Amino acid sequence: MSIATLNIPLHVKYIQNLGKSDDELMYHLTAHLRLNAVYWGLAALCVMGHKEALDRGEMIDFVMSCWDDEAGGFGAHPDHDAHLLSTCSAIQILVMQDALDRLDIPRVVNFIASLQQPSGVFAGDSFGEIDTRFLYCAVNSLSLLGQLDKMDVGKAVEYIRHCRNFDGGFGSRIGAESHAAQVFVCVGSLAILDRLDVCDADTLSWWLSERQMDSGGLNGRPQKLEDVCYSFWVLSALSILNKLEYIDSDKLISFILSAQDPEGGGIADRPGDMVDVFHTCFGTAGLSLVGYPGLEDLDPVYCMPAKLIEKMGLRKGWKALERRSG
């Protein structure tokens, strides 16, 4: 395999094999991420044009087996407590698989809305940890369900505004350091809520462009190593702000492709490390946004297929780079 080419068939096979590794210790050690991992795998397959590679019925049944009937939300694994992170992944999967009829929408909406705090931010679950990630999960989920009116939008926007730092970036909570992943969740939330005016777009775009390192890869904050997953976190925000040209896309593409496993498939955080489905998802997502040939268009606001989001009438004014010829 040429390292300069995305080996789609090998990555598809890698994702297909993930569910067959339940005899390995790591499979069980990552149970707390299982439902998220199913979403990452499905999203990557959609980007690569192979959504059908995983059995639809089995996937939907697994999602529903993670339902926490007491809370009215989804846990990461059967018999796990409901959490906003896994609930968001469950809703995204059911939307992508056209299976929302399996969902008790009033109950899950009530679960999500109940986690909004007086400050406007959301807790992840009943234990009360707050984070702008959870706010994004709530906004994403309620938007997909057509239920944004069930949250206090004004308070959520004001919380995000107070998370904005002098460098234009956003943190996990008020006063926290700017971080590229938190920038995505805040900018994504503001895009869904039609409140991008809260961003200092010029300063933030400069800060995001400074995340690119000599290797071509992107980091999450100053003085940190480059990591493939920031290919999505940084590019998604720049795409929403219509500033993707701030990144050297050729160098970034080379970095992502160099992190592939040429034998077993999958993409790692950086060249030479172990691959995982998280970085495979966000590596392919980043490649889609910069126009890598042969990939499907990805909506950077929802991290879901662009055609689906447009069909639902939810598309915002983002721009990706033009798809290159193969």
Image (tube, rainbow, N blue to C red):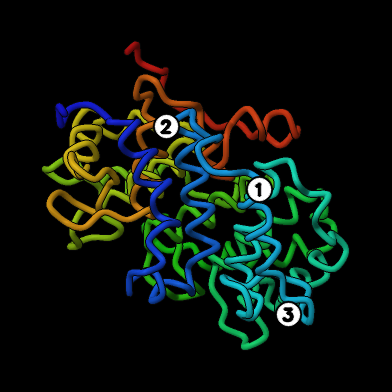
Judge left or right: residue 272 versus residue 206. left
* Residue kind at label 2, given as amino acid type: Leu
Toward the viewer: 270 or 136? Answer: 270
Q: Position of residue 289 (x, y in %)?
A: 42, 32
- Residue 86 falls in which quadrant of the image? bottom right
Q: Residue at x 67, y 62 (%)?
A: 138
* Residue kind at label 1, given as amino acid type: Arg
Gap in Å between the C-alphas at discs 1 and 2?
A: 22 Å
Q: Which residue is mark 2?
A: 289
Report whether residue 118 is seen.
Answer: yes
Toward the viewer: 278 or 228? Answer: 278
Q: Is residue 117 above or below residue 191?
A: below
Q: Mark 2 or mark 1, which is nearer the start of the sequence?
A: 1
Proximity of marks 3 and 1: CB atoms separated by less than 8 Å: no
Nearer the observer, disc 3 or disc 2?
Answer: 2
User: Quick one: label 2, few (<14), some, or many (20+) residues within 10 Å?
Assistant: many
Judge left or right: residue 205 versus residue 159. left
- Residue 167 falls in which quadrant of the image? bottom left
The N terminus is located in which quarter?
Answer: top left
Gap in Å between the C-alphas at discs 3 and 2?
A: 36 Å
Q: Which residue is mark 3?
A: 118
